[in-house]
Image (cartoon, helix red, strand yellow):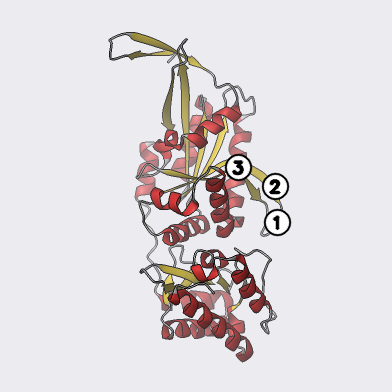
């Protein structure tokens, strides 16, 4: 297609010729300003939320940032959408572009902590002059934000991501690679969007997106892949014991029983990697604070989620909480200086009485502060 025609209300015809984008940077900015152009790859509800442009990608747990992804978006189901933008004038081999995307996805899934994703979104929204919580509420149509972030984390940990190549022209060789990968990969998706630009002599522009990779075979293969049945809490504890042993299970059961006795809600997360313990806030919202991880055998405290609660919104309040945890009689405590981090201890260490008393005292204080709805 070399040109298209627009017929105005006055029945006059305007011809628009296919034109290149002025630069890749301007092409990328266009997606930031108008994410609706990616709607064809944005999931069933057709909306996408920008997390960050040029998001760093680490190459190890707590490692240095080795790469930079062009854009990270989220769809309404909390599926991370990794976007790489290339102009047809980019002479790099298609295999290099595909390998680059696979590097980003493999390492992002493994090493992006959810608190970093949340903070990147908040920084992006603030820089755009938006109030992050209000902007997110509008994107979610006022659905629960914390459930959304839990879904994002679950999707990351299970590898449910969407890799999206965006270009002004998708060569047939790249198109076939995208189709093949999308047919083979589960639960991840691989798609491409070609966005051709047409312009008139008077400056009128039209952008024409076309989706690549959603073949009938890919849709059929992914449709017959049923999600795994959700584990019961007992089944989850049995699988934990198989990985980390009886002492880890005993410490976890002790914590779960305490949480239930003290009116915490305990659920298996969507990824089934964690048991999450949450508190019902004034107004009826659940906030999940503690996460017992099957993969690591540790119990984490989400300072990121606590930051959304009035009592722990100020940095000083979360700093005091972090200092209290550092004073615990624990040989397994991991705690960075980040006030949106996830300090943790091993679950088997909860069998030690001194640590148990310190942990339950802190969890009790958090419960009281959250339920009261007041600032500390």
For disc 1, the neighbor class at 10 Å (few under 14, some 14 to 19, many from 20) is few
Q: Secondary structure at mark 1?
A: loop
Q: In this figure, which residue is indicated by the disc labeled 1? A: 63
Q: In this figure, which residue is indicated by the disc labeled 2? A: 66
Disc 1 from disc 2: Cα separation = 9 Å
For disc 3, the neighbor class at 10 Å (few under 14, some 14 to 19, many from 20) is many
Q: Secondary structure at mark 3?
A: strand
Disc 3 from disc 1: Cα separation = 16 Å
Is 290 situated above or below 4?
below
For disc 2, the neighbor class at 10 Å (few under 14, some 14 to 19, many from 20) is few
Q: Secondary structure at mark 2?
A: strand
Is 156 situated above or below 26?
below
Q: Is residue 263 left or right of residue 326?
A: left
Instruction: Identify which residue is drawn at 60% across, 70% down.
Output: 318
Q: Is residue 95 left or right of residue 3?
A: right
Q: In this figure, which residue is indicated by the disc labeled 3? A: 69
State the residue lying farthest toward the front.
375
Percent of width and height locating residue 182: 46, 41
């Amino acid at each position: 297609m070399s040109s298209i025609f627009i017929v105005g209300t006055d029945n006059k015809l305007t011809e628009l010729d296919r034109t290149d984008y002025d630069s890749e940077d301007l092409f990328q900015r266009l997606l930031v300003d108008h994410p609706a152009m990616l709607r064809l790859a944005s999931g069933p509800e057709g909306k996408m939320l920008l997390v960050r442009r040029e998001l760093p990608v680490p190459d190890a747990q707590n490692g240095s940032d080795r790469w930079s992804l062009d854009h990270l978006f989220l769809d309404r189901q909390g599926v991370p959408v990794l976007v790489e933008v290339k102009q047809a004038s980019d002479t790099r081999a298609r295999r290099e572009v595909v390998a680059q995307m696979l590097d980003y996805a493999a390492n992002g899934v493994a090493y992006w902590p959810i608190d970093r994703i949340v903070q990147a979104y908040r920084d992006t929204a603030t820089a755009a002059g938006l109030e992050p919580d209000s902007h997110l509420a509008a994107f979610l149509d006022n659905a629960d934000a914390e459930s959304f972030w839990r879904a994002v984390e679950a999707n990351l940990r299970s590898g449910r991501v969407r890799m999206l190549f965006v270009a002004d022209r998708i060569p047939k060789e790249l198109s076939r690679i995208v189709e093949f990968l999308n047919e083979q990969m589960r639960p991840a998706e691989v798609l491409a969007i070609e966005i051709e630009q047409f312009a008139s002599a008077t400056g009128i522009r039209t952008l024409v997106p076309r989706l690549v990779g959603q073949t009938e075979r890919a849709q059929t293969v992914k449709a017959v892949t049923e999600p795994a049945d959700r584990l019961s809490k007992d089944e989850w504890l049995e699988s934990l014991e198989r990985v980390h042993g009886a002492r880890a299970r005993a410490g976890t059961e002790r914590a779960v029983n305490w949480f239930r006795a003290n009116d915490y809600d305990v659920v298996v997360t969507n990824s089934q990697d964690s048991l999450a313990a949450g508190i019902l806030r004034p107004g009826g919202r659940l906030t999940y604070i503690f996460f017992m991880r099957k993969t690591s055998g540790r119990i984490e405290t989400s300072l990121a989620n606590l930051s959304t609660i009035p009592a722990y919104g100020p940095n000083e309040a979360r700093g005091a909480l972090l200092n209290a945890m550092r004073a615990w009689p624990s040989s397994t405590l991991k705690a960075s200086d980040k006030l949106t981090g996830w300090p943790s201890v091993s679950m088997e260490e909860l069998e030690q009485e001194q640590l148990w008393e310190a942990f339950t005292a802190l969890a009790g204080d958090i419960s009281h502060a959250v339920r009261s709805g007041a600032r500390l």
